[in-house]
Image (cartoon, rainbow, N blue to C red):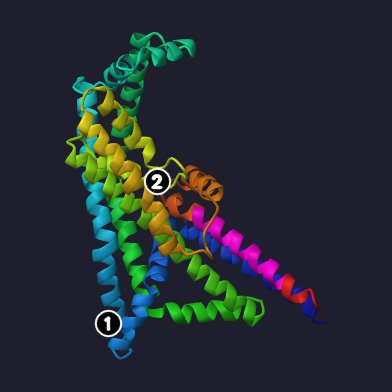
Amino acid sequence: MRNPTFEQKAFILLLALVTIAFFWILLPFYGAVFWAMVLAVVFAPLQSRLNQRCNGRRNLTALLTLTICLLVAILPVIFITSAVVAEGTSLYEQLESGELDFGAYVTSTLRALPPPMQEQLQRVGIANLDGLREQISKGATTGSQYLATKVFAIGQGTFEFFISFGVMLYLLFFLLRDGQELVRNIRVAIPLADSTKRRLQIKFTRVVRATVKGNVVVAAVQGALGGLIFWALGIYSPLLWGVLMAFLSLLPAAGAGIVWAPVAVYLLLSGSLWQGIILTAFGVLVIGLVDNILRPILVGKDTRLPDYLILVSTLGGLALLGLNGFVIGPLVAALFVASWNLLGTKKKVRLPE
């Protein structure tokens, strides 16, 4: 005798096992799959406009959108990454040869401080400048060795990178072409009310676009401005420092100032007064205001996360997933907040009943 309840439970178990196995198979290319999905969501509005102009020819529209995405978002990142690797290699060589001595820069800066500040440093235990210089030099050497290891790993993983890159482009084409149909199928399969599924879909797309635009675009602008001012002032490796400022711009409050502020202090204390004043003014008035001006325009108030959530989710994402966590961490946090807000909204609506 058939037992419908047993059959349903067995089917759900089979579905869960097959789903886990499917994601396990995709795990080696999770980065390629993730970025293909993110880029498909971000460029979906452009896809819709091009589809109208191309009279519904989906293959042509997807190819045009993919080409624009490649030129606007993907190739610039590849070129910048290769340039950063080249600058990192050069920095490693100069640190190894002793041409660059960060310890000497720091100790000379401390010696240039006013006597009251030097007395305060002595009280907190920073009195032995020679020992401090030695420690900083050792730290710079260790960092340069780590950088060299990463550069070597990038060179070793070139073949793997091209495979993942090809998988991402291939998948992105089909997500752009068949994305709307795929979304409809997923919505039908999810066992929730139609209104709830619709609102979750809207929240998801808004959060993805807002997270990518709010984090990546703002970080790229701040890093580009920081690298530009470093280049204009003749500071070594402006591209490398610009990329570092782009990553650190995710940290609330300080952000890119962790990089440019110490450099400005060094310029002021080492006698390069005008360079220090220009860098300080540019950092405060231009780089520092980009976040306050651009982020509300790109993100909006609905999906704006608190600074502490951005900080924790970004650091957690980077720790667990590497560079992909740069976006995945804040994205998961934003979806978490959006889902709970949706649950709270539904309860408020049902409360009068």
For the residue carrying disc 2, how many other residues have a C-alpha within 10 Å: few (<14), some (14-19), or many (20+)? many
How far across and down, in percent of the image, does residue 273 sit? Answer: 22, 29
Q: Can residue 84 be seen in this view?
A: no
Instruction: Name the residue tied to disc 1.
Output: 60
Instruction: Calculate the distance from the C-alpha at mark 1 to the C-alpha at mark 2.
Output: 38 Å
Which of the 4 quarters of the picture holds residue 341? Answer: bottom right
Q: How would you classify the magenta stretch by its main secondary structure? A: helix
Highlighted magenta segment, given as a residue range: 330-347
- Point 53% across, 80% down: residue: 185
Front-lying residue, 243 or 113 = 113
Residue 202 in the figure: left or right of residue 10: left
Front-lying residue, 288 or 352 = 288
User: Which image quarter is the C terminus in?
Assistant: bottom right
How far across and down, in percent of the image, does residue 191 sit? Answer: 66, 76
Residue 256 in the figure: left or right of residue 346: left
Instruction: Name the residue tied to disc 2.
Output: 249
Whether the residues at callouts 1 and 2 have beta carbons within 8 Å, the answer is: no
The amino acid on which the numbered mark 2 sits, given as a three-letter code, is Ser
